[in-house]
Amino acid sequence: MRRSVVLFLISALLFSLKAEIGEQNHKVPLFLSFIFPGGGQIYNGRYFKAGIYAALEGVLIYGAVKQNQRMEDAKDDLKYFRNIGDFEKINEYEYYVNTYTNERNNFIWMSAAAVLLSAGDAFVDSHFKSFKRDVFRSGDELSIIPAGAGLKLVYQW
């Protein structure tokens, strides 16, 4: 309980650190992405991306928890079959334990990769927030015209 209150307070503090003047602190969205799924994207105002990352990380964490439960159940069954000496079932449940363990570990690795991807995306996105998106000035023209056997892209200023 205490730990979740501390994490909540840290998150609230980091969300309130948006600079009023000048550039924002680019490390804030990076750390928010590590604290909770999509946190850095929310800080950057990229709510759709935040939803995607939150869903992705949630599914991967759920998969790891589910495979861990299956592994624990298979371990219990394996212990039972070892006690009664059913060698056919012992081999079968050893296979299940190994399979569920490997799948759980894969989900954990994919979860870690998703968190790193989310953090990197939030960090890079914070740098591009101040990037001028309006490339064209008034009077500029971008057109595609036929040229020989193909097309030609022309930019006039």
Image: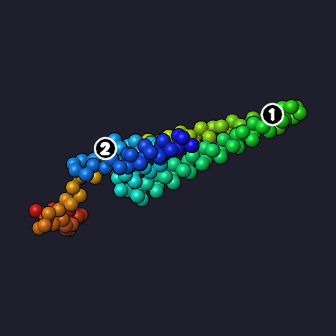
Q: Is residue 80 above or below residue 42?
A: above
**x, y percent for residue 143:** 19, 67
- State which quarter of the image contains the N terminus: top right
**x, y percent for residue 127:** 28, 47
The numbered dot on residue 32 is none
Which numbered disc, 1 or 2, marks the residue closer to the eye? 2
Q: Quadrant of residue 64?
A: top right
Nearer-the-camera pick, 147 or 54 = 54
Separation of residues labelled 1 and 2 (CA atoms): 52 Å
From this viewpoint, is residue 24 visible? yes
- Secondary structure at numbered mark 2: loop
**x, y percent for residue 63:** 61, 47
Q: Amino acid at mark 1?
A: Lys
Please give the residue where the numbered disc 1 appears in the rendered image. 79
- State which quarter of the image contains the C terminus: bottom left
Q: Amino acid at mark 2?
A: His
Please give the residue where the numbered disc 2 appears in the rendered image. 26
Question: Is 127 on the left-hand or right-hand side of 89?
Answer: left
Q: Please tell me how many numbered marks the rendered image carries.
A: 2
